[in-house]
Image (cartoon, rainbow, N blue to C red):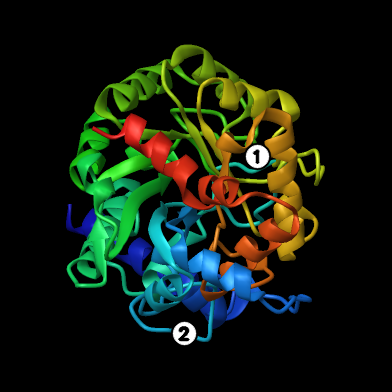
Amino acid sequence: MLKKILLSVLMIVVVVFVTALAANSFLGRDYFINGASKVVPTSLLELSEEGKRLHKRLWVVDLHNDLLLAGRDATEWAAAGHSDIPRLQAGNVGLQVLSAVIKVPFGLNSRHNDDNSDMVLPLAIWQHWPVRTWFDLTERALYQADKLKKIANSDAVHLITTKKQLEKRKPLGVILAIEGLHALEGDEKNYQRLYDAGYRMMGLAHFFDNKVSGSAHGVNKGPLTDFGRHIVKRMEDDGVVIDLAHASPSAIKEVLAMVSGPVVVSHTGVKGTCPSMRNLSDEQITSIAAGGGVIGIGFWTTALCDITPDGIVKAIRYVSDLVGVEYVALGTDYDGATKVGFSADKLALITDALLRANFSEHEIRLIMGENTQRVLGQILH
């Protein structure tokens, strides 16, 4: 018995050593502090006075941000990464969805990933996450919820878990989301644990297939599993926002056929302006809009093919022309190990670009926040 215990301890020590070494050398320190999130040099036009004034009047909502994974203080303005609470405030963000990333495979790509490796493990060790999170995906989700609650226990941020709380416009509101239900570890009891911890938006899959759903980037890219269908029904009953970002095409189609209310795609691009495998087709956009859902346009390179404000607005215009301006929103994917053209404090650039593209003030209000507010109000209890 003692021999088995010692062997187990030795194995853990070896894993810790190897993953810490990977964090320090293979991936590099910068990845584990800032999530490899970069602002790349981009030609940015000077803001017009009209754009500045209008942006100050907006209630801006962003459907996806991975700030919780960054290893820096979210309450301090940083030169690194894309966002933090002060930069979100400077960008006039009124409501931010903050997503917990639980597991990401090494060799990440958009086409074919299995679940046999775990890039978040060395990150967790590097950032001194509790030992309980190292090999337990549910505990990782609960830990990130705790991180958010510490931020939310301030005058600057409040956590939103109910429809009623959406009405509070100050201070910055945050909704807790999870990127992939591999965090359930295949156990329904863990769904309730995540709900009780404050999660009100859940993505079915991330970069690999799991016990709930196939991923657009997985090996099999299959539909929902039987367990997944049950979980989707529970989410709908409980007022949890169903996020189809990263879900396989067959899973997206199945969810849209079985739910009675709207869903979101929190962060994506569209094939009509950028033919990436990850991006939504016209058929998918039309089906999501038919159910009253909303599509968050991402700001990163493979979502847009053009990361300037005008490139973002081009994708917004495409969705608006296809299905209507009521079904498009912002889904930046800030701090998601992505390359973007500007950080959160400069979101007025989008308002200005929308004006240049001849969107009306009413339409801009919808795009920049009110569409998402509508959908959240329909879903949350």
Closer to us: 180 or 274? 274
Residue 189 at what x, y percent from top left? 21, 31
Q: Which residue is mark 1?
A: 217
Q: Residue 203, relative to residue 257: is it above or below?
A: below
Label 1, residues with CA under 10 Å away: few <14, some 14-19, many ≥20: many
- Label 1 amino acid? His
Relative side of 150 to 115, left or right: left
Asked if marks 2 and 1 touch (Cβ < 8 Å), the reply is: no
Say whether residue 302 is visible: no
Disc number placed over residue 68 in the picture, else none: none
261 and 333: which one is in front?
A: 261
- Residue 151 spot, x, y in % from top left: 25, 69
Q: Which residue is mark 2?
A: 78
Tell me the residue at 19%/72% (across/down): 154
Dot 1 falls on a residue whose secondary structure is loop
N-terminal-most mark, 2 or 1: 2
Kind of residue at badge 2: Ala
* Badge 2 element: loop
Q: Is residue 254 left or right of residue 8?
A: right
Q: Quadrant of residue 46?
A: bottom right
- Rounded to the nearest angstrom, the CA distance separating label 2 from label 1 is 32 Å
Give the foreground label among 2 and 1. 2
* Residue at 62% over, 75% down: 49
109 relative to 229, above or below = below
Q: Residue at x 65, y 39 (%)?
A: 217
Residue at 39 percent across and 78 percent down: it is 86
Can you give x and y, in whole percent of width and height, for residue 268 in the image? Answer: 63, 45
Q: How many marks?
A: 2
Left or right of 128 in this view: 41: right
Question: Mark 2: few, some, or many residues within 10 Å (few <14, many ≥20)?
Answer: some
Q: Quadrant of the C terminus?
A: top left
